[in-house]
Image (cartoon, rainbow, N blue to C red):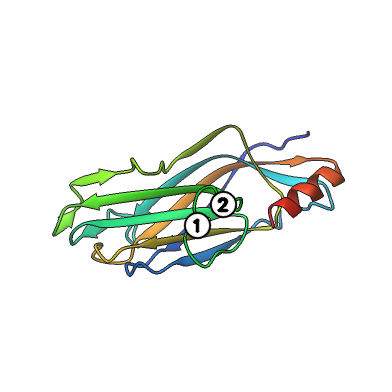
Amino acid sequence: MARSDSFFIRATLDCGNDNAYYQEAIDLGAYVDALGKSVLRIHNIAVTFSDNTGRSNQVNGEAAAQFQLLTQSQANIVLPSNRAVISSGKLAVDGAGGVATYVSTDYDNLPQLWTNGYLVAVDTIFLGGAASAGFAGDTYCSITMECTVETMTQAAAMALSLSQQ
């Protein structure tokens, strides 16, 4: 497979603070064309949960936030075993009345590092997430993905694309 130099794709989702599910589409049409044999390889993902300015979100009590990066649109959080899931992460915090004093990512790991990357052959992926009412304001999930574009045979690219839809 021929590879390009790596580049970064960034996206931010407002997860609210009402435990509802929110989702934004990330257009990959400039990088992915299964008929043209072009696919995207995501090498790693870094994730930040913050307020709308990038600072730590204030916490009113126990709170949780989670995200998922998907190859298919979803109506709610799905299990990591769902074939549409590229990556997921969860954060549980406590620290009533200010900045969180206890933070745990033990339930799900936010950064994602793959040995050989994750191939994507669909032209749109989805960033979904939710945050509980324990946060004082809306919680924002920002992701940065290190990627390369690669070529595959048309048959392999199309098969991968169909498996991710």
* Image spot of residue 145 (x, y percent): 54, 45
Circles 1 and 2, Cβ within 8 Å, touching? The answer is: yes
**Quadrant the C terminus occupies:** bottom right
Q: Is residue 149 above or below residue 53?
A: above
Q: Is residue 8 above or below residue 11?
A: above
Circle 1 SS class: loop
Q: Is residue 76 above or below residue 117?
A: below
Is 43 left or right of 139, judged from the image as shown?
right
Residue at (59% x, 63% y) in the render? 73
Q: How many marks?
A: 2
* Image spot of residue 8 (x, y percent): 57, 45
Question: Is any atom of residue 58 visible in this view?
Answer: yes
**Quadrant the N terminus occupies:** top right
Residue type, mark 1 in image:
Val
Q: Residues within 10 Å of mark 1 (few under 14, many from 20)?
A: some
Residue at (79% x, 46% y) in the render? 157
Is 89 left or right of 60, judged from the image as shown?
right
Residue 78: mark in rendering = 1
Quadrant hosting residue 17 = bottom left
Question: Is any atom of residue 32 visible in this view?
Answer: no
Q: Residues within 10 Å of mark 2 (few under 14, many from 20)?
A: few
Towards the viewer: 158 or 79: 79
Residue sitting at the far left: 97
Residue at (48% x, 64% y) in the render? 76
Circle 2 SS class: loop
Disc 2 designates what residue?
82
Residue type, mark 2 in image:
Asn
Is 61 left or right of 151, judged from the image as shown?
left
* Image spot of residue 107 (x, y percent): 36, 44
* Image spot of residue 30 (x, y percent): 71, 55
Rounded to the nearest angstrom, the CA distance separating label 1 from label 2 is 7 Å
Quadrant hosting residue 43 = top right
